[in-house]
């Protein structure tokens, strides 16, 4: 890592969904609005961080003082993040990355006659796990990821925290997607748990940008 620019913490934030193209007019995506990621970018810039926001297709304005890189697919996000990660001291990975993408992208429109009349199937392949790929060289960066879970979310989020080498994972339910308020549990790799109930995403963002890397649990 190169030294901090003017002593400011350099923050990388990802936001919004990814879009995985089927053909020139269709895609797979999800309901993420990018609100959480943009709120984090805004809160980080407000505390004086030098912020790069990598945003999927979202219709939100770029927060003041934030550098923005627009991406569409998970693979584009990965390429942009690889570059930003090298230069950052803290990463907030709020993007809702599509787990799968179509194996092939039709050059022209996917037509009914090619697909069959009543049924059609689309072959999907896994997208890379972007967070895990960059945290292989985590160093002493602060890494905060998210987990949207149903059912036994706590256990799954803890597993992701460890597997993806995060310092903190922010656990929330699917109702958080595309909503202005949310309830979250912030789990730290030191075993800490902090619950924030029915807060605006801006309020949650303020807490997140104030986190510092915890010590490993013994
Ligand atoms: O989707 P999942 O619950 O595994 O996401 C957990 C974290 O990993 C999130 O911070 C998300 O942005 C990230 N992720 C990723 N690459 C994927 C899927 C998720 O970086 N392919």
Image (cartoon, rainbow, N blue to C red):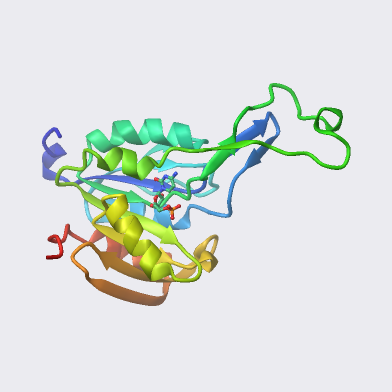
x and y percentages locating residue 73 in the rendered image: 51, 36
Q: Residue at x 45, y 70 (%)?
A: 182
Q: Residue at x 30, y 57 (%)?
A: 161
Q: Is residue 204 left or right of residue 213?
A: right
Along the line of sight, the residue nearer the viewer: 191 or 37: 191
Does 23 sit above or below residue 134?
Answer: above
x and y percentages locating residue 186 in the rendered image: 31, 67
Q: Is residue 70 visible?
A: no
Q: Quadrant of the N terminus?
A: top left
Tell me which corner region of the image, top left, top right, bottom left or bottom right, holds residue 23.
top right
Along the line of sight, the residue nearer the viewer: 179 or 46: 179
Q: Is residue 49 left or right of residue 155?
A: left
Q: Residue at x 69, y 25 (%)?
A: 106
Q: Is residue 94 left or right of residue 122?
A: left
x and y percentages locating residue 43 in the rendered image: 31, 57
Tell me which corner region of the image, top left, top right, bottom left or bottom right, holds residue 197.
bottom left
């Amino acid at each position: 890592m190169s030294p901090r620019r003017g002593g400011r913490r350099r923050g990388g934030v990802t936001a919004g969904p990814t879009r995985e193209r089927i053909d020139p007019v269709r895609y797979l995506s999800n309901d993420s609005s990018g609100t959480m990621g943009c709120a984090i970018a805004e809160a980080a810039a407000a505390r004086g961080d030098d912020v790069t926001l990598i945003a999927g297709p979202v219709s939100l304005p770029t927060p003041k003082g934030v550098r923005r890189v627009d991406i569409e697919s998970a693979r584009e996000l990965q390429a942009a993040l690889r570059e930003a990660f090298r230069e950052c001291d803290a990463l907030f990975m709020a993007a809702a990355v599509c787990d799968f993408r179509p194996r092939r992208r039709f050059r022209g429109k996917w037509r009914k006659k090619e697909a069959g009349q009543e049924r059609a199937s689309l072959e999907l392949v896994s997208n890379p796990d972007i967070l895990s790929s960059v945290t292989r060289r985590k160093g002493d960066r602060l890494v905060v990821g998210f987990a949207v879970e149903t059912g036994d979310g706590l256990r799954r989020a803890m597993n992701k925290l460890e597997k993806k080498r995060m310092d903190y994972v922010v656990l929330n339910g699917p109702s958080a997607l595309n909503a202005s308020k949310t309830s979250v549990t912030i789990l730290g790799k030191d075993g800490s748990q902090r619950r924030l109930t029915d807060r605006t995403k801006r309020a949650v963002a303020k807490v997140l940008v104030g986190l510092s890397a915890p010590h490993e649990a013994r």
